[in-house]
Image: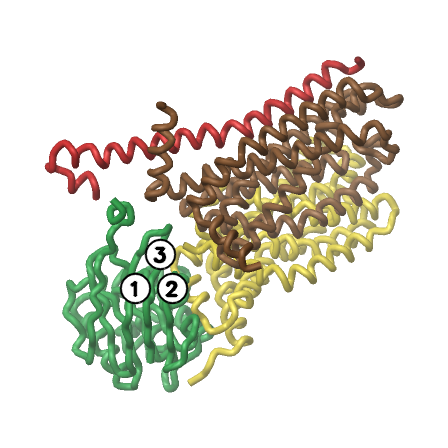
Chain colours: A brown, B yellow, C red, D green
Amino acid sequence: MNRIVLWFHQLGSPPTFHRYATRWMPWYFGASLLLLAVGVWAALFRVPADYQQGDSYRILFIHVPCAWMSLFVYVTMAVQAAIALVWRIKLCEILAMACAPIGAAFTVITLATGSIWGRPMWGTWWDWDPRLTSELVLLFLYIGVIALDASIEDRRRGARVAGFLAMIGLVNLPIIHYSVQWWNSLHQGSTISLMGKSKMDASMILPLAFTVAAMQLWFVGSLLSRARTMLLEREAGKAWARDIAVHDSTRGNA
Amino acid sequence: MSAPTLPRAAAAMLARDLRLAWSRRGDTLQPLLFAVLVVALFPLALGSERARLAMLAPGAIWVAALLASLQGLDALFRSDAEDGSLEQQLLAPVPLSLLLACRMFAHWLTGSLPLILIAPLLAQLLFLPDHLLVPLLLSLLVGTPLLVLLGSTVAALTVGLRRSGMLLPLLALPLYVPVLVFGAGSVMAAAQGQDWLGAVLLLAAGLTLALVLAPLAAAAAIRIALP
Amino acid sequence: MTYLSYIVAAYAVFAVVLAWDGMSPWLKHHRLLRAIRQKAARAQGPANVAGAGSAGATE
Amino acid sequence: MLAVARLRFDRNDTCVFGPLDFAVHAGEALLVTGGNGVGKTTLLRVLAGLLRAGEGELSWRGEPCTRLPTEGIAFVGHLAGHKADLGALDNLRFATGLHGCRHGASPTSALASVGLAGFEDVPAGRLSAGQRKRLSLARLLLSPARLWLLDEPYANLDRDGIVLVDRLLARHLNENGAALITTHGAYAAPPVRARTLILEAQRVDAESAA
């Protein structure tokens, strides 16, 4: 127990975290790309076409993992922000803010692929489907967090204020989802929805599991990458940052 | 020596804000004017066909009320931060959340209540059927305080910024979505002959929660956001 | 394959956005390292060459 | 009344001031002096509880505390803290509602004793900078707090105003109050029992590491 606490404290020190992130980042990205390649190959060429949707449902193999990740990243961000605010841990502030652009990227992919899927299915690029609408609001939440963080000069204060907003948004997220569903029932929305009630074919599960795992790993890799960059940006004047920069150049020139 | 008590501090805060609103009555009425303008533009854009306007009326009035509630929100706490009175409120021996709750209440009284009072007039402009007036007024009465509470919590986050510009609407919008959905939705439901009270009750539940949580959250936000 | 163009478009969007997500912090990291190196060189440069004006440069 | 040990404050990992050790006793004033940017204002804001100290210990009347009790301190900062659209008297009434009122004082008498009699209904925004400072002093007079935290109280004041500050300070200290006053030393020290705390500029972190 004591060991874990100690390890955590050491990891929290900027140079250690930077070294840790630099070492492990390529592994996460590599594993993610490997799993993604297998998953996408299976999704495109191995899984039989759906009798109702034809081949268009192959889009779901990237749409669904990204939709899940967009929510998962938001929850992660809000939890990190809460830890940062309560225990004033600087690394958690950075991790929370590093989550925001990644989550926004997943949300953009979800919206874009959902809309591309919807074009042949609904006949329009956009439908006020409850899931897509919630996703759109989620994108606004992400943009709000990023914009608020960017608009405050003091980096620490910016991260804390934006983190607080993320926490408020987390409370609001289920309410938005519920309200949008109620609204949809009031206005009688579309009949076919993404990830509808239709039973998933057994052959779909394995490729989907691969892409989901790939996106999880990608998230960790990207989080490490962004966090180490933000850390370096904040502590650019420190001696450890200079050591790393000089070390990096000697290694690069050799 | 008279120690400050909670009721006395709250009364002082409320009196100050109402007096300030009165001394700048022109500015205070701006949200109202804004809402009237928005509503008046709908028939000009859509034509004066009664049935179509009546169908759009609940949504249009609710959107106007929502946009109007964003007016003045930007300056709600920043004006106090700029002249140093927010510092004094932070240093008062009463909870900041109580003072902020008073400010939010005063903001609703001066900004949203006049709008609710002239809502019947706006409804007439858009030919809202008479039997929908009660759902509209009730939903506004429950919904606008919720908008103010949520909006001022977000405004507290931007208090350290020099100007927030479009940032405040961007931050407030996701929080406003459920209020707009249930607020305008309740009137729509009434128009379709469905049960509309359920949505208003949901709004009321949200209002009760926000009444407790929003001032606390806003106080925490100000402490985080103030430079 | 039916709806081929839609599938290609969706996967292309996916690839482009992920590529941006992966590349942008990496590029920024390199820019930062270069900037730190340049700053370190500037801080050392005048002091090594001559003592004159070094006070202003290090302040 | 107030004792401080090893108090320091960091902004973005650079030390703004400290570690500082000092005490302020009842009936005595502590003058905090030093050039621009040495953290005088920051020190006052930390003591007022507007900023959170990086480390250090505070004690109030001999008892350790994490922040000073708000009813014990009155703060006058660079920002006057008046609403420009409210009259001078209304501003003071609001202040007494929020912070309480010293025994035997009233907004009207406080206005008179800072030389603002006749300006009761003038909006604070239309007062001159010096008059606004006087209005802040009137708020201070009304406050029941024992410890005054004054940030550059002499700024913007004419000769009479400086005398006024000195007189108010002397009276407050006589009544067993205490005060912490920042000044950059361009004005004469108040003729009261006072000690001086000189803040020095902190070295920049990058420089010390080089």
- Chain identity of mark 2: D
Q: Secondary structure at mark 3?
A: strand
Precedes in sequence: disc 1 or disc 2? 1
> In which quadrant of the rendered image does the N terminus of chain D lie?
bottom left
The answer to which quarter of the image holds residue B153 is: bottom right
The picture places residue A87, in percent across and down from the top left corner, at 51, 58
**Along the viewing direction, whichever of A139 and D64 lies nearer the viewer:** D64
Mark 3 burial class by Cα count in 10 Å: few <14, some 14-19, many 20+: some
Q: Residues within 10 Å of mark 1 (few under 14, many from 20)?
A: some
Q: Chain of mark 3?
A: D
Residue B109 located left or right of residue A244: right
Q: Residue at x 72, y 26 (%)?
A: A39
Q: Which badge, 3 or 1, comes first in the chain's sequence? A: 3
Report which residue position mark 1 lands on.
D19
Give, as a three-letter code, the residue at label 3: Asp
**Amino acid type indicated by mark 1:** Pro
* A139 lies above or below A50: below
Residue highlighted by disc 3: D10
